[in-house]
Image (cartoon, helix red, strand yellow):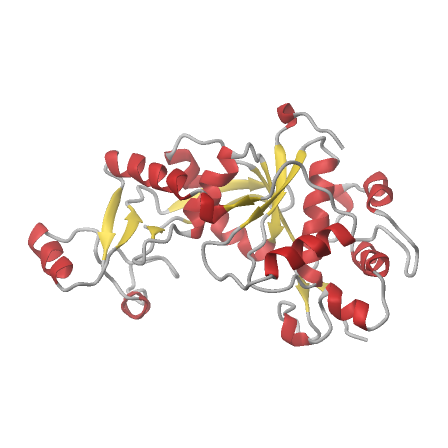
Amino acid sequence: MSHSADHGAGRFAPSPSGDLHLGNLRTAVLAWLFARSTQRRFLVRVEDLDRVRPGAEQAQLTDLAALGLDWDGEVVHQSRRLRLYDEAITRLDRAGLTYECYCTRREIQQATSAPHAPAGAYPGTCRSLTEAERTAKRDSGRPPAIRLRAGDAYYTIHDVLHGDFTGIVDDLVLRRGDGTPAYNLAVVVDDADQGIDQVVRGDDLLSSAPRQGYLASLLGLPIPRYAHVPLALNDEGKRLAKRDGAVTLADRIALGETPADVLTTIAVSLDLADPDEPVTLPLLLDRWDPRRLPRDPWVYRLL
């Protein structure tokens, strides 16, 4: 399928930490439908700055292809884009919008119960250290994280499913103490650099979108159109996970299903097919109307 770069792009961006489960695959199908129905390119990006399990990336790409998903261009890896993240942090630093943070996770958790800080926000402990205090912390040998010196406490993004959504913007981490670029920075830089103007992902990430939108605005980058889609849950109403049983494509195949059967299961969950109806992605694309997307989570009951 050829798609003009002028129409922008959507993406699916898994972390190669293990096999994709049905909830991940469902989100991938949704991201593909959102992109292809708007003549956008569809890109796959491997978010491998953190946990990487050997063989997981290839297994994930094989599963996506088995369902019929196609993507444009080469698969991009975050681990090969460190220079872009460093450049973004340097730009923020030159604008006076960064500072070193020496807090441990535990210290942050204990401090965030402070009454003036929004729930879950970094309380600003290291924001106004004196030079002497900073030197003392540096001499202690603990490598600092780099944080954003945010000027706003809240930021509003627009989501095509949720409407206007306002969330906390705190002094988020840009680079961790071990030197790894933080997720919020990397995705903002990547999306802009790759021409991705449509971000479809699970609605568990909705609360991080205002931070990312705010960071994009500071860097002078376009803010994508967001669509945070309902998650897949298990019988107990918790987010579907591999420990719930036979929830990966390989698991379902081992039980005698085909990738086409799994695609039907996903399509039924999206009200795009009748139970047991054979479907293909082009057929689902013909039926696709984002306004009719179910808004409640999909509860997957293992048979």
Residue 64, image x, y percentages: 71, 52
Q: Quadrant of the N terminus?
A: top right
Q: Quadrant of the C terminus?
A: bottom right
Residue at left offset 31%, top offset 70%: 106
Q: Is residue 11 rendered to the left or right of residue 301?
A: left
Residue at left offset 73%, top offset 29%: 2
Residue at left offset 14%, top offset 64%: 140
Does the rendering let one see residue 280? yes
Residue at left offset 71%, top offset 66%: 248
Q: Quadrant of residue 297?
A: bottom right
Q: Is residue 117 rendered to the left or right of residue 26?
A: left
Residue 28, image x, y percentages: 68, 50
Nearer the observer, 301 or 168: 301
Residue 221, image x, y percentages: 45, 31
Q: Is residue 9 above or below residue 47?
A: above
Q: Quadrant of residue 95?
A: top left
Q: Is residue 259 rendered to the left or right of residue 123?
A: right
Q: Is residue 188 above or below residue 296?
A: above
Residue sticking out furthest to the right: 277
Nearer the observer, 95 or 88: 88
Q: Is residue 219 above or below residue 75?
A: above
Nearer the observer, 160 or 172: 172
Q: Is residue 231 above or below residue 166?
A: below
Does the rendering let one see residue 211? no
Q: How many marks?
A: 0
Nearer the observer, 180 or 205: 180
Residue sticking out furthest to the left: 132
Residue 62, image x, y percentages: 71, 54
